[in-house]
Amino acid sequence: MPATRHLYLARHAQADPATGKLTDTGRRQAELLGARLREFAPQALWHGALPRATQTAHLVADHLDGIRPVELPEAGDYAPYLPQRHEIPDAHADGVLDFLARIPAAERSPELGQRALKLLTGPAQGSQERREVVITHAYLVGWLVTAALDSPPWRWVSVGAANAGLTIIRYTPRSPSSLVTLNDLDHLPPGLRWTGFPPHLRP
């Protein structure tokens, strides 16, 4: 019988757009995220390959006993699903398709998106509960949240993720997947919250 899986998703901490490396703010966000994740005693820590995700994961790992960060292609920065116009309501189709058209071809990977669903979602194999952390990017957070809610696949484009925000999804064997929390920022002081969001979307 499969067991419950708890998936802890976080977008990388704030990074310098020019270098891709964490800023001082980002390093502090990552440290506080690690301290928050410590209370859940996770058994695995996955991260994307880009420097901002790798650095965040290593700072998080400093707070987790016996956990080594492992790079995972499926946790990278890519568009995980590319809808056709007929999938999107007419009122939103132009805006969504214009957004997707601006994503470089090298950063579009529906194949990775499907692999992420197979690898990171659903109940855990075996009889023991699993607690897994994924340090990733906004697109994958949106993709996995959309799948957890059984929303139309194109809706991943409308889920935002703050830097170092914590999203938790629970997968149990006999129940629908559950979105426990989205963009939880309680571990960050007010001055470190909501980076990564454009000003008009910040609370």
Image: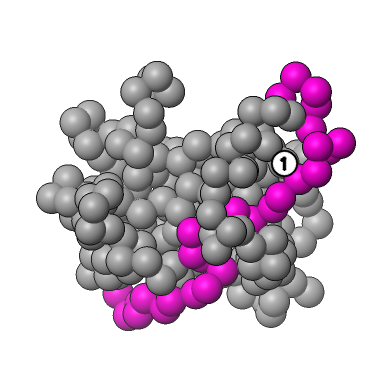
Q: Is residue 44 left or right of residue 38?
A: right
At which x and y percent is residue 43? 45, 73
Q: Position of residue 34 (x, y in %)?
A: 29, 58
- 89 within the magenta span: yes
Q: Is residue 153 left or right of residue 53?
A: right
Could you tell me what secondary structure mostly forms the magenta stretch? loop
Q: From the viewer's perspective, tell me whether residue 147 is left or right of residue 160.
A: right
Q: Residue at x 42, y 46 (%)?
A: 166
Task: Give left or right: position of 108 versus 191.
Answer: right
Q: Quadrant of residue 116?
A: bottom right
Front residue of this view, candidates 72 and 183: 72
Q: Position of residue 113 (x, y in %)?
A: 66, 61
- What is the magenta range? 64-92
Give the answer, above or below, for where 195 lies relative to 104. above
Q: What amino acid is found at the position of numbered circle 1 in the picture?
A: Trp
Can residue 70 be seen in this snapshot? yes
Q: With respect to residue 98, does 84 lie above or below?
A: below
| Residue 199 is a magenta residue | no
Q: Residues within 10 Å of mark 1 (few under 14, many from 20)?
A: many
Q: Quadrant of the C terminus?
A: top left
Circle 1 sits on which residue?
154
Q: Determine the residue positioned at 78% across, 51% down.
A: 175
Label 1 element class: helix
Give the quadrant of the N terminus: bottom right
